[in-house]
Image: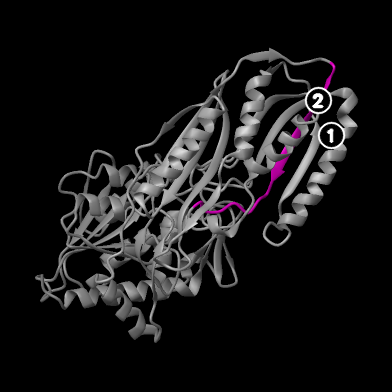
């Protein structure tokens, strides 16, 4: 069976098309054109703004013109992670695989975050079986790397009363709040030194970690490849003279780093000692992560002698700072049981230009003051190590409204359809809802979606039966709104 033949057919047909459209963050031109062409083909009113967001309006089902206008909202971009470093997300379609009750990709992220939300939004615009009041669908750009579309939404792009965000990842759960976040970038400046000729050079690699979403999966305790890499290097440098030629780990600020590597040198007479240390370290890591990191690999192999190395002072500063930097859950919510309140993700370590090493971290919290507290702790940590530190603009959280009318209607819809009262939750991941509420404080908002797992990693997958439940819940929720008056 093909993905386009799955039920609900109207959603999966569009989702199948979306998976074949390259759409990395900040490179959404092709998916934007697809949405605009879709609107044109179905004689729908569409508009765009300067940053590239797209809004499509449809009139109410006759007799429901006075109902509140509902905004269906999703984002166009996807996180691009692959097991194959040569995979080009700017030109290559995603290859989808039906694996039992799940849809996944072949070695890459699937892009169901948020391709399935976009597909459901488009399907609803043309589904004749749906009873609804006025509806507009808003598709934003660059949600994954900066929420650029939500930050800069154009004047007059939306004018609805209710917003249903289609970017959640758990069936039978309704989200009414999310964390805010801010990125912190720490830059080390180094001098290049000639590589010692009497040293032996090796490539240390951490590979095939589980990774995952730095919000939704941060509480699972998965390995951070950057931390594992520098943990070993710290212990080597504490015993022997070590030189660092290359270091690279992680990619995206909102993904737990799955892989990292470094090229280092040690005096040739100490090579066997280092190999013995490494074998012991591998055994320790396997024991520590045996239950949650089944595919994790650590390798050590000889490397060619590089021409240059990083000066020893900066090498040690980077290794020590990355090893000791905070990562993971900082505190749990006292308001909602099981919710991570505050966390930080040591996302990436990159060598840029000829003399810079950049460490990027991402902080999240449902409490704004705690978000900045952990960001400032990260800043203080890296300042002590000699780095220059800057913070991004950040984005606000979304405070739960437990009296939300749309929350109650979405909950009633699910219960009527499936006999289960969905859980009402907040999510530690960032949603664009906080930004929309800041710009449009009158909005009544809710977020729900089908079950997705391991998003932001090549293990991302979507539970097929949950897609139909999500779509039917969405249809019935719109019908319930249509029966109300402004």
The front one of 93 and 361 is: 361
Dot 2: element: strand
What is the distance, in whole Å, between disc 1 and disc 2 at their CAs? 8 Å
Q: Is residue 329 magenta?
A: no
Pick the quarter of the image with the C terminus. bottom left
Residue shown at the point (77%, 33%) measured from the top left: 236
Label 1, secondary structure: give it.
helix
* Residue at image location 17% in from the left, 70% down from the top: 133
Q: Which residues are magenta?
A: 198-214
Q: Is residue 467 above or below residue 193?
A: below
Residue wearing tag 2: 266
Magenta span includes 212: yes
Q: Residues within 10 Å of mark 2 (few under 14, many from 20)?
A: many
239 and 154: which is toward the camera = 239
Q: Residue 134, position in %: x, y?
A: 16, 66
Q: How many badges with numbers are in the image?
A: 2
Q: Quadrant of the N terminus?
A: bottom right
* Relative height, residue 380 to residue 431 (above, below): above
- Residue 181, visible in the rendered structure: no
* Upstream in sequence: badge 1 or badge 2: 2
When the figure is inspected, residue 428 is found, relative to residue 8, above or below; the finding is above
- Residue 356 visible from this viewpoint: yes
Find out whether the residues at labels 1 and 2 contact each other: C-beta distance under 8 Å: yes
Residue at x 50% of width, y 71% of height? 464
**How far across and how far down the image is residue 361, in percent?**
50, 40
Residue 121 in the figure: left or right of residue 243: left
Point out residue 463 in the picture as x, y percentages from the top left corner.
Answer: 51, 69
Residue extending farthest to the top is: 194
Viewer-nearest residue: 419 or 328: 328
> Residue sitting at 57 percent across and 51 percent down?
108
Question: Which disc is residue 274 wearing?
Answer: 1
Left or right of residue 32, residue 194 in this image? right
């Amino acid at each position: 069976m093909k993905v386009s033949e799955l039920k609900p057919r109207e959603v999966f047909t569009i989702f199948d098309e979306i998976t074949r459209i390259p759409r990395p963050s900040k490179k959404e031109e092709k998916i934007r054109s697809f949405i605009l062409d879709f609107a044109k083909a179905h004689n729908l009113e569409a508009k765009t703004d300067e940053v590239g967001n797209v809004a499509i309006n449809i009139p109410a089902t006759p007799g429901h013109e006075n109902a509140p206008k509902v905004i269906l909202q999703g984002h166009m971009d996807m996180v691009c992670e692959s097991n194959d470093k040569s995979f080009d997300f700017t030109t290559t379609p995603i290859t989808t695989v039906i694996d039992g009750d799940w849809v996944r990709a072949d070695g890459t992220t699937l892009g169901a975050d948020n391709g399935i939300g976009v597909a459901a939004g488009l399907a609803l615009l043309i589904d004749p079986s749906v009873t609804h009041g006025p509806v507009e669908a808003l598709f934003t750009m660059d949600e994954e790397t900066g929420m650029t579309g939500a930050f800069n939404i154009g004047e007059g792009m939306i004018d609805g009363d209710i917003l249903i965000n289609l970017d959640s990842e758990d069936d039978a759960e309704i989200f009414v709040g999310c964390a805010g976040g801010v990125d912190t970038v720490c830059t080390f400046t180094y001098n290049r030194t000639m590589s010692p000729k009497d040293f032996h050079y090796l490539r240390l690699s951490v590979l095939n970690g589980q990774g995952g979403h730095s919000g939704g999966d941060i509480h699972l305790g998965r390995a951070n490849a950057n931390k594992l890499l520098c943990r070993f290097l710290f212990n080597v440098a504490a015993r022997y003279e070590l030189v660092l030629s290359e270091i690279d780990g992680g990619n995206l600020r909102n993904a737990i780093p799955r892989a990292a590597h470094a090229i280092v040198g040690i005096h040739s007479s100490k090579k066997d000692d280092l190999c013995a240390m490494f074998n012991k370290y591998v055994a320790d890591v396997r024991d520590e992560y045996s239950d949650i990191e089944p595919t994790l690999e650590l390798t050590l192999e000889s490397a060619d002698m590089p021409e240059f190395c990083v000066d020893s002072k900066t090498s040690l500063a980077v290794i020590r700072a990355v090893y000791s930097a905070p990562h993971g859950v900082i505190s749990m919510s006292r308001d909602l049981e099981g919710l991570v309140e505050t966390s930080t993700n040591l996302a990436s370590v990159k060598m840029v230009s000829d003399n810079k090493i950049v460490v990027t971290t991402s902080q999240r919290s449902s409490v704004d003051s705690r978000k900045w507290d952990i960001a400032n702790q990260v800043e203080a940590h890296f300042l002590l190590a000699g780095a220059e530190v800057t913070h991004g603009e950040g984005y606000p959280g979304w405070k739960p409204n437990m009296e939300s009318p749309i929350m109650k209607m979405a909950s009633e819809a699910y219960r009527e359809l499936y006999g289960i009262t969905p859980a009402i939750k907040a999510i530690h991941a960032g949603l664009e809802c906080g930004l929309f509420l800041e710009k449009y404080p009158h909005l009544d908002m809710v977020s729900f979606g089908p079950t997705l797992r391991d998003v932001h990693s090549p293990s991302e997958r979507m539970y097929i039966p949950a897609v139909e439940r999500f779509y039917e819940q969405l249809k019935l929720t719109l019908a319930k709104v249509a029966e109300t008056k402004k």
